[in-house]
């Protein structure tokens, strides 16, 4: 018989804030033989290429002794080397210690170069924000050793329902999206203590391919979804705790208790 367990779980939400990124123009960048011309502060990436979300800002800071510009050009002109200015943004000349900041609100790829040193060029990729980082707490709390259950983190532009459907026969977890979504993917991080080797996923009853990545907190699943998808089912090699084993343990404890009680009764007689 299929046992379906429903757990009601509170949600805590951590919202992505608008972020300001910094790309430094390092000392010596005006030399065409310099080892690199850009350096992103948070990652150290030196390609001048950066990926952000709508509403985020990028600041280019001049740590060189020469003047530089951040000037928007068309994508095709980057490939041909003609550097056709498209007028979307232009910092004008700014010198050592100065900076230029631009907020990007539209999706797309925004190419730029330094009009003084055209070998210095890069691109800002503005992609759709996948949503907020949220946590489902105390999943299967009644079946964990500490009684606290397990936490599942996910990223989505709306909420998952505060109910997780666990089917031990299928070794599956089922999530339901509560509101309308425009996201193209759902990101889940599933702790191995809850489900081992998540290997199959269904979206609204249709099996789908997905990406996995091991993290320090569990297995990250990147599941493609369609706008207004509703039900996500994940199957693994084992749902933990092993509900069948727990039942056997409870039964064993009950049998031992009955035997002890019977022996005590006989002694009294």
Image (cartoon, rainbow, N blue to C red):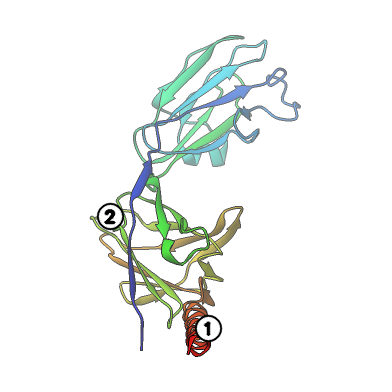
Q: Nearer the viewer, residue 50 or 215?
A: 215
Figure label count: 2
- Circle 1 sits on which residue? 260
* Residue name at image x 65 percent, y 33 percent: 44
Q: Give the residue furthest to the front.
A: 269
* Residue name at image x 29 percent, y 53 percent: 182
Q: Quadrant of the N terminus?
A: bottom left
Residue 40 versus residue 245 in the image, above or below: above
Residue 21 versus residue 211 in the image, above or below: above
Please indicate whether residue 234 sits to the left or right of residue 94 in the image. left
Give coordinates of residue 151: x percent, y percent.
46, 55
Give coordinates of residue 161: x percent, y percent.
29, 58
* Residue name at image x 28 percent, y 64 percent: 229
* Labels 2 & 1 near each other (Cβ < 8 A): no
Give coordinates of residue 228: x percent, y percent.
25, 60
Give coordinates of residue 3: x percent, y percent.
36, 81
Q: Nearer the viewer, residue 67 or 173?
A: 173
In this rendering, the label closer to the viewer, 2 or 1: 1
Which mark is first along the chain, 1 or 2?
2
Residue 47: image quadrant is top right
Please indicate whether residue 164 sits to the left or right of residue 81 in the image. left
Residue 113 versus residue 64 in the image, above or below: below
| Whole-number angstrom distance, CA of label 2 to CA of label 1 | 58 Å
Is disc 2 placed on a helix, strand or loop? loop
Please indicate whether residue 186 sits to the left or right of residue 218 in the image. left
Is disc 1 placed on a helix, strand or loop? helix
- Circle 2 sits on which residue? 181
Residue 19: image quadrant is top left
Badge 2 crowding class, 10 Å Cα cut-off, few under 14, some 14 to 19, many 20 or more, is many
Badge 1 crowding class, 10 Å Cα cut-off, few under 14, some 14 to 19, many 20 or more, is few
């Amino acid at each position: 018989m299929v046992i379906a367990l429903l757990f009601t779980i509170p949600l805590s939400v951590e919202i992505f804030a608008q972020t300001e990124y910094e790309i430094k123009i390092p000392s010596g960048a005006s030399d065409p033989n310099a080892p690199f011309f850009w350096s992103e502060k948070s990652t150290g990436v030196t390609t001048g290429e950066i990926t952000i979300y709508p509403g985020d800002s990028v600041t280019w800071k001049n740590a060189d002794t020469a003047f530089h510009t951040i000037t928007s050009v068309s994508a095709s002109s980057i490939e041909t080397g003609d550097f056709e200015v498209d007028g979307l943004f232009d910092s004008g000349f700014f010198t050592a210690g100065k900076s230029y900041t631009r907020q990007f609100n539209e999706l797309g790829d925004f190419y730029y170069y330094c009009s003084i040193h055209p070998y210095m060029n890069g691109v800002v990729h503005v992609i759709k924000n996948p949503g907020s980082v949220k946590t489902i707490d105390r999943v299967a709390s009644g079946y964990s050793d500490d009684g606290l259950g397990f936490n599942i983190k996910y990223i989505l532009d709306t909420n998952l329902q505060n109910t997780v459907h666990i089917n031990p026969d299928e070794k599956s977890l089922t999530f339901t999206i509560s509101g309308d979504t425009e996201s193209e993917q759902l990101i889940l991080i599933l702790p191995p203590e809850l489900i081992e080797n998540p290997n199959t996923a269904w979206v609204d009853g249709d099996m789908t391919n997905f990406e996995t990545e091991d993290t320090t907190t569990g297995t990250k699943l990147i599941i493609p979804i369609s706008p207004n998808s509703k039900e996500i089912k994940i199957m693994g090699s084992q749902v933990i705790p092993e509900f069948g084993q727990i039942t056997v343990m409870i039964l064993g404890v009950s049998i031992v208790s009955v035997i002890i009680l019977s022996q005590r009764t006989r002694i009294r007689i």
